[in-house]
Amino acid sequence: MYTENNSLNKYIGNWLFFMFINVSLIIVIGGLTRLTDSGLSITQWQLFSGIFPPLNLDQWNKYFELYKEIPEYKIQNYSMSLEEFKVIFWWEFIHRLLARIFGIFFLIPLLYFTIKLGFKKTKDLFPIFILICLQGFIGWYMVVSGLTDKVDVSHYRLSLHLFLAFLIMSLILWNFFKYKKIKVSTKKISNFFPISFLFLIFLQIIIGAFVSGMDAGTIYKTWPLMGSSYFPDDNSILNLFSVSIFDDPALVQFIHRNLAYLIFCFYLLIAIDVYKNKLSVFVSIVNVIAIILLCQIILGILTVLSDAQIILASMHQIGSILLITTSLILVFKNSRIN
């Protein structure tokens, strides 16, 4: 029985890693769906029949006619042809299909491992499945916001959708570390810095979703200044204290930029602590974070200068996945719980 349980724990670890790769792929595809303005191409949520794409011209025309009823088509894409519609349709369809497959691939093994090992062994994984179900609802809640009065979805709902995706990814990865029994260090960094660093990255992801949702990345195409000054030159600094601060694209881009600088400062504090106290066990992961963080900053700058080119913006999002992943490794290794 002991050998069987150890074998199952190994399989659970492998399964969780597979699910981590899957959810990362969904985040990337979701980002591309947003960047290509494809997210509103499917205007209905059909949980079961929606797994099948249009198979003939009549079905394609049906989906296209439904799309023609929403503001995005009437205001922005009124000259779009059926062939052009198919391009944005496939992005959204693949994104939804991957999400469905992800949910099934999470639930079935979870039930199997629970039957084999008991609920006590797998209880930490059930909240993840609840979040996955919630994420499906939030995804549709987000899409609905762009079907009536606006050509885009609500940036608040978009940020919630993205935050939940990264939270699910992080919880899967954290449990993967536990099942793989990754060793923690006996020598510790002050917990404040790694946890604060991780918190700030999550906050930056939320603000980044605001930037994407409002196309705020295209407001100012200069760096390090925003126009001719450090602060947006068409705005008042008093607006930073306004209740509508997150509805102003220029201010959202300003916050996104400066939060990146703050994250870099927190990284320096971690690196100084590691090298000053000769905590060799953390050197490798801290160096990897440095490389990813530097690339992420450069990609962010290039995205702004390039008017948010899709390939750069997508790479920037991939960078956020890598940054969250490595930061979680740092926090886990620094954990006092074995």
Image (cartoon, grey):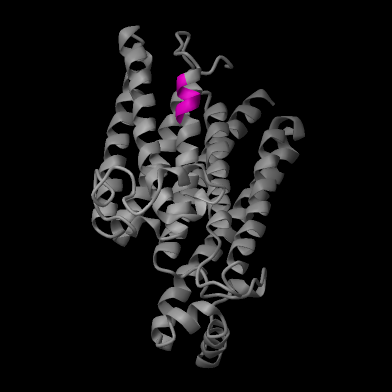
Q: Is residue 133 above or below residue 59?
A: above
In the image, residue 232 lies at what x, y percent? Answer: 34, 49
Viewer-proximal residue, 60 or 39?
39
Q: Is residue 49 above or below residue 60?
A: above
- At horizontal 37% and vertical 15% (from top left) the residue drawn is 281
- At horizontal 68% and vertical 53% (from top left) the residue drawn is 133
Tell me if residue 28 can be seen: no
State left or right for residue 249 relative to residue 218.
Answer: right
From the image, which quarter does the C terminus lie in? top right
Q: Is residue 1 above or below residue 259?
A: above
Find out whether residue 286 is within the magenta segment. Answer: no
Q: Is residue 112 above or below residue 150?
A: above
Which stretch did the figure color magenta? Answer: 193-197
Q: Report the residue that reaches farthest toward the bottom.
A: 58
From the image, which quarter does the N terminus lie in? top right
State left or right for residue 67 relative to residue 138.
Answer: left
- At horizontal 44% and vertical 13% (from top left) the residue drawn is 189
In the image, residue 15 lies at what x, y percent? Answer: 55, 42
Secondary structure that dominates the magenta span: helix
